[in-house]
Every structure is written in structure tokens, then in C-alpha cells.
Image (spheres, grey):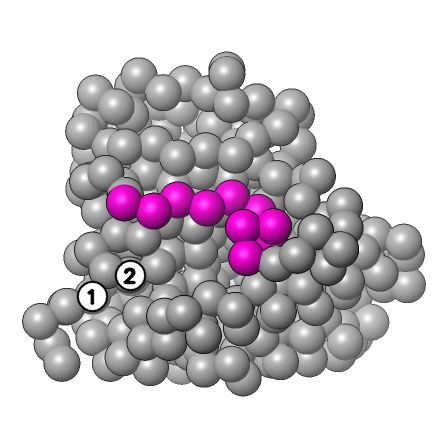
């Protein structure tokens, strides 16, 4: 099975690129972030024609998440409120950032973690609050299904210095601050492991490059798009890679897809 995550930075802008990529890769599940479109205007037909079932949670111009699956998903849930009480969630589901499906017995959670803008800002505080609630949400999911959970998406956090092209003086930079990293470590401590790092320990591998500085041409990137697996799925992972080819296209997303391959018969 192949599961991919990709921040497409507008599905309508990148529609043709995603269609072509799906034809080439034939992934079983594609998790998208920053779709930036309300559900009624989502371009469904090109992907349905490829044989995918679409599950979406969008909003106008910002955020938005979606999951495409090769087979119909028997269970779909949207937002933190699908697992947590309203008083715990508050207004954190107003931004469309969380969607999950069950596919072939695996619960796949697709996330678009808030960026946070800058350390110490109101948006930074919002990000930390959101991450704290994410931990509660995943804890609840793991109580239900402890062995088969895949959590993926744009985390807007480079967990380690090797995930940044030049980590010098980044300790107070958004996406690399100690508090953000610790919040993510607290989530992983629930029993999740980084699929990409099972196969690649070196630095120099990134999934996001700033448009403004021709960063992609110089490989000055950050690895902020992740796929995390529970222990059993981690053992079944046979490959995990970042596909740079869509980032080389004209008018691409600033992110590249990440793909994990699982051998579900490999117990």
C-alpha cells in the first residue's frame, strides 16, 4: 500500500499537476493540505474519473484538507470534535485542518498544523494550543486502535536540526523553536515513529522550499511534511521518500509529496 501526503497550496491551481502525479504514482491514499476551497467548489470529477473516492473538509482561500482513497472508506471523521468534547475543542475546529479515514484497517489522520507566524505571536500561542489538543485527539484514537494509526500532513515543524538546510540561529525561528519541537515530541511519545527516518538518516532532504528566495534551486529547504506510524505499521514500512518531481514543474506548490510504502503482509 502507498500512502502520500502533499500540501498542494490550492487544489484548483494545482489540479492538473495532482491528476498527472496520481496517474504516475498510483498511490492508494493521498492526503492533501491547503486545498483552499469550500467543499461545494472542490474539483471532484477529475479525481473521481481516476477511480478515487474523495473526502474533504475545506474553507474559502485558506487551510482545507482532503483525503483521496482507491476504495470507499468505511469510516470518515472531520475535526477534533469527532473524538473530543465540545468544551475541549472550543473554536479550534473553525479552521479546517483535521480529517481522518479508515482504509484497509488503517486509520489515516491528515493534518494541516498551523504555521504560527512568529515566535511569541498570538498565532504562535494558537499553534501551541492546537498541538496540545492534537495530542489529546490522537491519544483518544490510539485508545480505540492502538496498532494501526498513520498520522501525516504538513506539521510546520522541523523536528531536528538535520531537517533544516542551515539550522544556525534557528532556535527562536518559527517551525524550529524548542517549544514547538517539544510539543511534537510529546505527540510522538504516544507511540509514533517517523517513517522517513527509518530509511534516511542524513541531512539534506527537505519537503518545503520558500518561493521567494529561489530556495529550491539551491536546496535550501526544510523538512516539515511528515508521516508518522505506530510500531506495527512502522515495521511494515518498506520505503518512505520525498518526491521532488512536482516541485520542478512550472508554478508548483512550495511543498513536495512524501510517500510511504507498506507491506501489510509483513508482520
* Structural crowding at the residue carrying mark 2, measured as other residues with C-alpha within 10 Å and reported as few (<14), some (14–19) or many (≥20): some
Q: Where, by quadrant of the figure, is residue 131 drawn?
A: bottom right
Q: Secondary structure at mark 2?
A: strand
Which dot marks residue 205?
none
Q: Is residue 240 above or below residue 55?
A: below
**Residue placed under numbered mark 1 in the picture:** 262
* Residue 195 visible: no
- Where residue 171 appears, as percent x and y from the top left, is 77, 76
| Magenta span includes 78 | yes
Residue at image position (28%, 61%) is 106
For the magenta stretch, what is the residue range?
A: 74-83
Residue furthest to the left: 265
**Residue placed under numbered mark 2 in the picture:** 106
Total numbered badges shown on the rendered structure: 2
Residue at image position (62%, 69%) is 136
Quadrant in the picture for the C terminus: bottom left
Q: Are marks 1 and 2 in contact (CB under 8 Å)?
A: yes
Amino acid at each position: 500500500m502507498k500512502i502520500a501526503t502533499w500540501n498542494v497550496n490550492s487544489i484548483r491551481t494545482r489540479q492538473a499537476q495532482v491528476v498527472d502525479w496520481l496517474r504516475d504514482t498510483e498511490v492508494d491514499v493521498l492526503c492533501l493540505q491547503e486545498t483552499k476551497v469550500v467543499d461545494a467548489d472542490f474539483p471532484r470529477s477529475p479525481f473521481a474519473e481516476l477511480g478515487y473516492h474523495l473526502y474533504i473538509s475545506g474553507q474559502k482561500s485558506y487551510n482545507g484538507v482532503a483525503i483521496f482513497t482507491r476504495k470507499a472508506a468505511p469510516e470518515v471523521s472531520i475535526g477534533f470534535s469527532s473524538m473530543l468534547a465540545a468544551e475541549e475543542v472550543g473554536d479550534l475546529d473553525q479552521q479546517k485542518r483535521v480529517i481522518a479515514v479508515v482504509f484497509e484497517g488503517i486509520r489515516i489522520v491528515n493534518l494541516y498544523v498551523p504555521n504560527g507566524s512568529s515566535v511569541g505571536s498570538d498565532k504562535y500561542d494558537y499553534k501551541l494550543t492546537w498541538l496540545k489538543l492534537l495530542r489529546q485527539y490522537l491519544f483518544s484514537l490510539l485508545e480505540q486502535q492502538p496498532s494501526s494509526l498513520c498520522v501525516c500532513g504538513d506539521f510546520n515543524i522541523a523536528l531536528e536540526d538535520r531537517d533544516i538546510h542551515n539550522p544556525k540561529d534557528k532556535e527562536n525561528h518559527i517551525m524550529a523553536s524548542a517549544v514547538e519541537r517539544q510539543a511534537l515530541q510529546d505527540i510522538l511519545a504516544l507511540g509514533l515513529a517517523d517513517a522517513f527516518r527509518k530509511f534516511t538518516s542524513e541531512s539534506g532532504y527537505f519537503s518545503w522550499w520558500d518561493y521567494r528566495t529561489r530556495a529550491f534551486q539551491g536546496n535550501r529547504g526544510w523538512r516539515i511534511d511528515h508521516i508518522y506510524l505506530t510500531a506495527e505499521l512502522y515495521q511494515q514500512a518498506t520505503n518512505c521518500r520525498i518526491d521532488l518531481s512536482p516541485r520542478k514543474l512550472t508554478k508548483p506548490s512550495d511543498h513536495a509529496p512524501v510517500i510511504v510504502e507498506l507491506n501489510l503482509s509483513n508482520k
